[in-house]
Amino acid sequence: MTTPRGAWSAAGAVAGVAGLAISHAATMVLTLRSSPLVAVAELIIQHVPGGLAERAIKVLGSNDKPFLVVVIFLIMMLFAMWAGRLAEHSWWKPILVWVGMGAVGLLAVLTRFDATALDYLPVTAGVVTWIVALSFLTEPLHHADAEDDTQSDGKSRRSFLIRSGVLGVAGIGVGIFGQNFGAKRRHVEETRRLLNLPVTDPKSPRGTMVDVPDMPSWKTPTGEFYKIHTAVVVPTIEPQDWSLRIHGKVDREITLTYQELVDRPLIQRWITLNCVSNPVGGPLIGNAWWSGVLLADLLEEAGVSGDADAILQTSHDGWTCGTPLDMVTDRQRHAMLAIAMNGEPLPIDHGFPVRTLVPGLYGYVSACKWVVDIEVTKFEDFEAYWTDKGWSEKGPVKIASRIDVPENGDDVETGTVRIGGHAWAQHTGISGVEVAINGGEWTRVDIGSSPNTDTWVQWKTEVDLEEGDHTVLVRAVGSDGETQTGVERDTRPDGATGWHQIEISAS
């Protein structure tokens, strides 16, 4: 009797899930890195065009990576079902499908930063599981096709269902077992929580907050600080397992452990960070109290070669960024290896145990989370992750401002209306902020104080509004005399420009 084709597809799907579960579990046990499925997603992210990556972030936000993983899983299931269909008439064609899928996974894991021979074992385990599982599942189906009597055919199909159930449950069990190794993140989080670092957590300095109802805090709470990274699975690194290598065009190579770094003299400073992908008036910016070690001190110890002009930073997950050497060695800029944020050890999502910060540069060229390698080099000798996708090489922060209160589209009462927001020009500073109502003249407004030039400032004003719709524009003036341009440009290749504008209605 002929077995329904759906059974062959189902056999392929069950085998596919079993193989992925074994691969995931093997990864957790052997390497404690993310699974080959996630590695494929990481490989795609590394090679996707910059414009497409930016659009994905805009549409999906922080859900772009999970969405990609789900899409890849569904595609793999389609290939697995195809392999099951092929098994109806051929023993070797499904193997080609499995091996092809395994080759993609192998390529993904072996192109990771610091990949070792051990990384290929989970992929191999997955491919072997696919082949064996499909043979195990399809044996009763072949018998059913060969049977002439209904009773024997029924036994074969029951055997197929039992085998599918057993294999499915086993696959889920193995997957759960492997996932329990993901408890490493929980352990790292507990280790992080128990660290006793010699850092402080000051309140916002006097005068930095302006008196406008509903204004965001000048000091961004850690839980509200924006998160942008390319990691599909955030690295979880035990402090005792972390080390930093400084090498390249230096007189002497340096390797630091976490404890050696913490034992060094620490600096603490208010610094505002923002992402190059932040649109005009956007939320991808935050201000925090950072604690760490001056990069300039470490590079001085290493002895930088005279012909070097950059450092190439590499994250634990393989992400890279290139940073101008002169900005890192400028002690007045306070570039640092940060170990704490707002008085606590760095959150895992923000780079625990160590990340870099360089005030005045966008994060894509300076802020390397989970940093493990710094090579002193020349810009002409490398292309970092985002510059390889068409973004500019050096990424200095542009002067900018935004309106926080009221929000675009808000209804306000007629009469006196309080308006407030933020302005920033890291490492230059803000000397003034101007507001224009309904296309009128620019008027200087009050600004809050700032402890240094590397933080944003808050601003406020009061305007009298009659009933009707109104337009509010804002622009900043830097301490160097530069007035924020009104020319509108997209975030690519070196940051957005233009004046933030809102529309409000008074009634």
Image: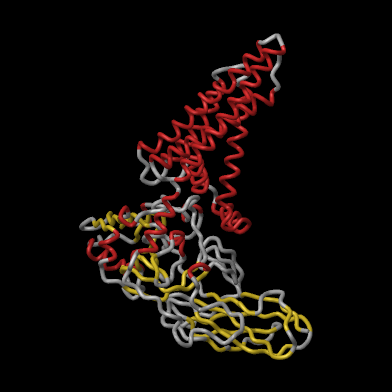
Please state which of residues 224 and 137 is positioned toward the viewer in this rendering.
Answer: 137
Residue 481 x %, y %: 48, 83
At which x and y percent is residue 43? 49, 44
Residue, far left: 252
Quadrant location of the C terminus? bottom right
User: x and y percent of residue 298 in the render?
Assistant: 26, 64
How many numbered markers are drawn? 0
Of the pair 7 and 106, the residue shown nearer to us: 7
Quadrant for residue 428, please give it: bottom left
Q: In this image, 178 relative to 336: left or right?
A: right
Q: In this view of the protein, which residue sits in the foreground, 265 or 431?
A: 265
Q: Is residue 313 left or right of residue 35?
A: left
| Residue at screen point 63% across, 57% down | 59
- Name which residue lies at 39% across and 66% down: 357
- Give how far across and how far down residue 82 sits, in percent: 62, 28
Visible residue check, residue 255: yes
> For residue 462, what is the image quadrant?
bottom right
